[in-house]
Image (spheres, grey):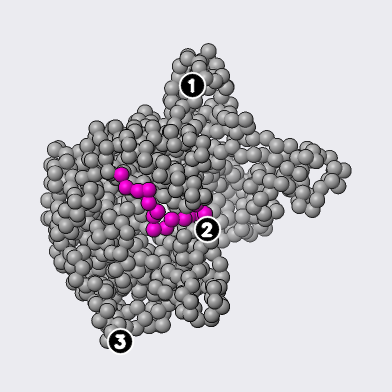
C-alpha cells in the first residue's frame, strides 16, 4: 500500500493521509496539488507534502480523487517558510496554505445542481422553482450561487431542497478549476494567398466587396510594418471596419483565426529612460554594498525625497546582473502605481506586479512566471502577500516604508508581519534584505543601533532640495478669535490662495473618511449606533446615509431623533467628504478630488487619480493616510494637516510613534523638486512633544523618548506582545470563559499578563470581545516556552464543553 500526506486549506494543524496506487505514488512529488474527499460530501484541493508506506492508525485512508499538477507548484523553501509562519504566529498550516496560494490555484468544491425531470413534471413546480428548471434547459448543471443570482435572493437553499424533495433536481459536488488563461484572437492569411502573384487573384475573388478588399490591404500593410502576428483587434482598429467583415473572410477561407495564450499584464521599457545617481546617492549605494558583506539585513534611514527609489533601482540592477530574483515589498496598493511606472520604464517587462486589486487570473499568471523563474518576473513588486510566491533564486528583498502598520496582517490568519517574515524568507534563500524608511519603526531602528542590522543614513534631499518649512496653527486661538472658515484657519487659506495663484498643487490630510464620525441630537444627546457593533454610525452626506465601518450596516439619515423626536440633529467632527464639500464652496473654480477608501474601490481607481494629480488635472487633493505613503508629485508645494490631534489621541502604545511617522511622511510630499514646500499643521496642542519633534524633524528625540517609555512599561522592542482575543454572543459566558483562561495562564506563565479587558469597541457583528495581553521578555527561550504553555491552555479551553463555542484568535507581535 502506498500513501501520501497532504495539507488541506482549512483551519487544521495537521496533515492527512490518503492512499494512492503505485503509478500515482511514483508520479507524485511534494508540492503537487491533488483533489481529495474530506468529510461526507466535500472535495478539496490538497497539497502533497510527503510520500510513504505507513497506513494511518486512527482512520482508514481514503483514495485521492485526481492529480491536478504535472510538476510541483510549491517548492521546499516555501513549505519550510509556511511551517515557520504557522509555528511563530501560532496558527494552523492549513490557514497558511489557504492564504499563500492565489484563489485560482485552490479549487473550491461547489455544489452543482442538475435537472432530473421530464417536461410534464414541471407542473409540480412553483413560480420560483420553474425559473430554476428553466435555467437548466440551457445548461447541464448550475451552482447554488448561480441560482441565487437567477432568483435575486440570498437564501435559495429551501427552494433547492423543495425541488430535490419533488425529485425534479439532482445534486452532486464538483471541483471547478477557476483559472482561465487569457486567449487573444489573431488573424492570418491562408498560405495560398501569400504569394505576390496570387494577390491579384485574391482581389478578383473579393469582387466588389469594398470593405473586404480594404481589410485585406490593411492586413498586408500591418504585416510589413509590425513584423509579428496580427491581432484581430488591431486589424479592426486600423482598418475601421467591423468584426463581421473579418468573419465573412474567415467563412470564405481567405483569413484564418487562431488564438495565442497571452499575459494579462505586461510592461514596456522606455528606450531613453536613464538614472544618474547624485554624489550622495552613489555614496549610499556603495555603503549598502559594503554593509551587505557584514550584515544580511540593513536599514536605510533616508529623509523624505532623498531619492531612495533611484538607489533601490541601481541595487536591483546589480542583483539582476547576477541572475537573481528580487522582491520589492510595498505597504499599500496606492504606492505600486508610481513605482511600477518608474521600475518598468527602467527594467521593462522584467517587472511583475502582485496585489489584491488584480483578479485571480492575473495573480495565477504572476505565480506561474515566478515558479518558472521567467524573465517576465525577475523583479516582483507587491504588497505583503507577494511573500508567498514560489521564488527559487531570490537574491534581494527590498521592504520600502518598512515602518507601515499595513505590513501586519490582522484577519484572517496567519496574522504575520510581512517585514519580519521577509527577513526569515531571505535567510532561507541566503538573500539580502534592505529596509527603507524616512521614519523607521522603533524596533528596526533599535535593531540597527544594537548592531543586529546594518544602518545607512541619507540626510540630504535629492539635488539638495531643502526640507519644507512647517507652520503650527493653534486651533484654540483661531476659534477664539473667530478666524476659522469651516475647518480652515485664515493662515491656511491665505497660503492655499497663494499656492493656487502660482499654479501649484495642494494636498490636505484628514485621517477620517465620510462627512462626519457621528450625528447627535442637540436636545437629548442621542447618537445613532450600529445595532450589531458597539460604535456610532458614520454620516455620509453624498449618499445621505449612516454607515458602520465595521460590519457595513447602513440606514438612511434620520429626519428626527429616534429617542425624543426632536428635529435638531447636527453632525459632529469631520471627515474627508466634509472637507471636500467645504473646499468646493471656498474654491468653486478649482479642481478638487478626494482620495480615500470610498473613492478608490475600483481596480484602476488609484491609478486614474494619481495620474490625474501628477498631470496637474487636480488642484487640491484631500485624503486619508493613503496620501502619506511615499507618493512623489513635483508640483505639490503646500501640505495641510487639518487636525493633528486625531492621530495623537489613540488608545494604543504606538500612538505617538505612528503620529510622528504619519505627520513627517505627509509633510514629505511637499516641495520635492525645485520649488520650496511648506506644511501647515492645525492642532489644539501645539506644544505637544510629538508635534514639536515633527516641526524640528527630530527623529532621534522621538526615538529616545518612546524607547524610554517602552522600557518602563514593558513594550516592544524589550518585550514581545501576544494578544488573545475571545468572542461570543453571550456577554456572561464570554466573561466567565475569559476569566477562566486568564487564571489558567496566570498559574502557568511567569510573565506579565494583562486582562481580561473589554476593548474600546467591545462588540462587533453582535459578538462581544475580551482581550488578554501577554508580555514576553525578548529572548528566544522565553518565547518558545511561553507559546507552548499558551497553546496547551487554549487546547484545554476549547476542550471544556461550556467554553467550546467561544472563538479565540491569537495575534503575535501585536
- Which quadrant of the structure image shows residue 13? top left
Q: Which residue is pictured at 79% across the width and 53% down the height?
A: 127
Does label 1 or label 2 sit earlier along the sequence? 1
Tell me if 254 is positioned left or right of 229 in this view.
right
Element type at marker 3?
loop
Please provide the residue range marked out in magenta: 753-767
**Foreground residue, 674 or 807?**
807
Q: State whether residue 297 is above or below residue 514.
A: above
Tag 3 and tag 1, C-beta contact below 8 Å: no
Task: Give 166 or 633, whichever is nearer the viewer.
Answer: 166
The disc at residue 472 is none
Kindly identify the residue that appears in the image at 49 percent across and 62 percent down.
Answer: 548
Residue farthest to the right, as pictured? 120
For the residue labelled by badge 2, is the local secondary structure a helix, a strand or a loop? loop
Mark 3 vs mark 2: give the one in front. 2
Q: Nearer the viewer, mark 1 or mark 2?
A: 2
Provide the residue designation for mark 2: 532
Residue 429 colored in magenta in the image: no
Circle 2 crowding by C-alpha within 10 Å: few under 14, some 14–19, many from 20: some
Q: Which residue is mark 3?
A: 482
Q: Label 1, on which residue?
A: 4
Residue at the location (77% across, 40% down)?
165
Earlier in the chain: of badge 3 and badge 2, it is: 3
Q: Tag 1 or tag 3, which sits nearer the N-term?
A: 1
Q: Disc 1, disc 2: CB below 8 Å?
A: no
Q: Is residue 591 left or right of residue 502?
A: right
Question: Which element carries disc 1, helix, strand or loop?
Answer: strand
Where on the picture, by quarter, is residue 173?
top right
Q: Separation of disc 3 and disc 2 at Cα? A: 41 Å
Amino acid at each position: 500500500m502506498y500513501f501520501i500526506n497532504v495539507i488541506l486549506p482549512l483551519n487544521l494543524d495537521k496533515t492527512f493521509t490518503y492512499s494512492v496506487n503505485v503509478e500515482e505514488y511514483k508520479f507524485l512529488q511534494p508540492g503537487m496539488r491533488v483533489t481529495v474527499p474530506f468529510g461526507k460530501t466535500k472535495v478539496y484541493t490538497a497539497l502533497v507534502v510527503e510520500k510513504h508506506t505507513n497506513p494511518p492508525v486512527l482512520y482508514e485512508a481514503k483514495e485521492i480523487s485526481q492529480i491536478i499538477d504535472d510538476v510541483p507548484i510549491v517548492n521546499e523553501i516555501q513549505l519550510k517558510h509556511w511551517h515557520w509562519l504557522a509555528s511563530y504566529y501560532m496558527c494552523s498550516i492549513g490557514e497558511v496554505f489557504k492564504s499563500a496560494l492565489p484563489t485560482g490555484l485552490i479549487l473550491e468544491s461547489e455544489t452543482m445542481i442538475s435537472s432530473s425531470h421530464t417536461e410534464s413534471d414541471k407542473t409540480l413546480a412553483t413560480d420560483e422553482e420553474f425559473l430554476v428548471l428553466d435555467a437548466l434547459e440551457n445548461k447541464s448543471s448550475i451552482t447554488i450561487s448561480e441560482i441565487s443570482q437567477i432568483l435575486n435572493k440570498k437564501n435559495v437553499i429551501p427552494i433547492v431542497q423543495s425541488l430535490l424533495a419533488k425529485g425534479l433536481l439532482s445534486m452532486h459536488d464538483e471541483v471547478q478549476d477557476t483559472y482561465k488563461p487569457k486567449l487573444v484572437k489573431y488573424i492570418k492569411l491562408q498560405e495560398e494567398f501569400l504569394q505576390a502573384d496570387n494577390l491579384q487573384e485574391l482581389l478578383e475573388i473579393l469582387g466588389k466587396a469594398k470593405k473586404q478588399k480594404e481589410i485585406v490591404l490593411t492586413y498586408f500593410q500591418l504585416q510589413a510594418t509590425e513584423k509579428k502576428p496580427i491581432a484581430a483587434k488591431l486589424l479592426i482598429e486600423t482598418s475601421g471596419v467591423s468584426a463581421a467583415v473579418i468573419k465573412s473572410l474567415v467563412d470564405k477561407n481567405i483569413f484564418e483565426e487562431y488564438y495565442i495564450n497571452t499575459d494579462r499584464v505586461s510592461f514596456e521599457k522606455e528606450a531613453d529612460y536613464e538614472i544618474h545617481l547624485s554624489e550622495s546617492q552613489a555614496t549610499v549605494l556603495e555603503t549598502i554594498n559594503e554593509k551587505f558583506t557584514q550584515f544580511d539585513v540593513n536599514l536605510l534611514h533616508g529623509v523624505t525625497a532623498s531619492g531612495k527609489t533611484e538607489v533601490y533601482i541601481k541595487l536591483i540592477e546589480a542583483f539582476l546582473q547576477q541572475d537573481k530574483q528580487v522582491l520589492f515589498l510595498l505597504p499599500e496598493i496606492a504606492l505600486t502605481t508610481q513605482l511600477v511606472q518608474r521600475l518598468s520604464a527602467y527594467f521593462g517587462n522584467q517587472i511583475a506586479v502582485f496585489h489584491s486589486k488584480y483578479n485571480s487570473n492575473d495573480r495565477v499568471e504572476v505565480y506561474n512566471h515566478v515558479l518558472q523563474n521567467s524573465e517576465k518576473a525577475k523583479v516582483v513588486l507587491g504588497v505583503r502577500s507577494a511573500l508567498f510566491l514560489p521564488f527559487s533564486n531570490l537574491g534581494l528583498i527590498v521592504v520600502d516604508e518598512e515602518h507601515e502598520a499595513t505590513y501586519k496582517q490582522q484577519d484572517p490568519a496567519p496574522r504575520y508581519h510581512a517585514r519580519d517574515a521577509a527577513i526569515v524568507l531571505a535567510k532561507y534563500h541566503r538573500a539580502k534584505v534592505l529596509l527603507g524608511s524616512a521614519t523607521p519603526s522603533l524596533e528596526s531602528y533599535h535593531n540597527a543601533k544594537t548592531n543586529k542590522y546594518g544602518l545607512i543614513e541619507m540626510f540630504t534631499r535629492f539635488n539638495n532640495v531643502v526640507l519644507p518649512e512647517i507652520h503650527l496653527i493653534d486651533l484654540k486661538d483661531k476659534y477664539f478669535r473667530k478666524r476659522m472658515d469651516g475647518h480652515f484657519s485664515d493662515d491656511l487659506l491665505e497660503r492655499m490662495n497663494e499656492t493656487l495663484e502660482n499654479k501649484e498643487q495642494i494636498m490636505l490630510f484628514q485621517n477620517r473618511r465620510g462627512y462626519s464620525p457621528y450625528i447627535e441630537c442637540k436636545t437629548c444627546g442621542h447618537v445613532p449606533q450600529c445595532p450589531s457593533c458597539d460604535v456610532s454610525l458614520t454620516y455620509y452626506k453624498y449618499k445621505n446615509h449612516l454607515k458602520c465601518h465595521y460590519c457595513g450596516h447602513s440606514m438612511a439619515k434620520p429626519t428626527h431623533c429616534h429617542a425624543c423626536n426632536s428635529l435638531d440633529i447636527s453632525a459632529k467632527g469631520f471627515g474627508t467628504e466634509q472637507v471636500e464639500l467645504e473646499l468646493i464652496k471656498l474654491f468653486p473654480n478649482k479642481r478638487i478630488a478626494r482620495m480615500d477608501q470610498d473613492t478608490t474601490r475600483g481596480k484602476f481607481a488609484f491609478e486614474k487619480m494619481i495620474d490625474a494629480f501628477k498631470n496637474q488635472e487636480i488642484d487640491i487633493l484631500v485624503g486619508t493616510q493613503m496620501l502619506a505613503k511615499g507618493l512623489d508629485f513635483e508640483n505639490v508645494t503646500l501640505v495641510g494637516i487639518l487636525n493633528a490631534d486625531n492621530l495623537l489621541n489613540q488608545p494604543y502604545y504606538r500612538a505617538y510613534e505612528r503620529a510622528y511617522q504619519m505627520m513627517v511622511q505627509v509633510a514629505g510630499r511637499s516641495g520635492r523638486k525645485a520649488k520650496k514646500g511648506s506644511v501647515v499643521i492645525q492642532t489644539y496642542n501645539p506644544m505637544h512633544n510629538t508635534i514639536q519633534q515633527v516641526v524640528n524633524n527630530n527623529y532621534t528625540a522621538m526615538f529616545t523618548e518612546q524607547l524610554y517609555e517602552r522600557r518602563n512599561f514593558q513594550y516592544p522592542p524589550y518585550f514581545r506582545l501576544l494578544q488573545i482575543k475571545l468572542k461570543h454572543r453571550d456577554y456572561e459566558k464570554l466573561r466567565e470563559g475569559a476569566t477562566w483562561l486568564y487564571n489558567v495562564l496566570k498559574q502557568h506563565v511567569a510573565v506579565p499578563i494583562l486582562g481580561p479587558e473589554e476593548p474600546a469597541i467591545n462588540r462587533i457583528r453582535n459578538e462581544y470581545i475580551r482581550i488578554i495581553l501577554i508580555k514576553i521578555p525578548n529572548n528566544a527561550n522565553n518565547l518558545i516556552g511561553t507559546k507552548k504553555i499558551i497553546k496547551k491552555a487554549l487546547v484545554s479551553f476549547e476542550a471544556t464543553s461550556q467554553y467550546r463555542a467561544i472563538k479565540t484568535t491569537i495575534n503575535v507581535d501585536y
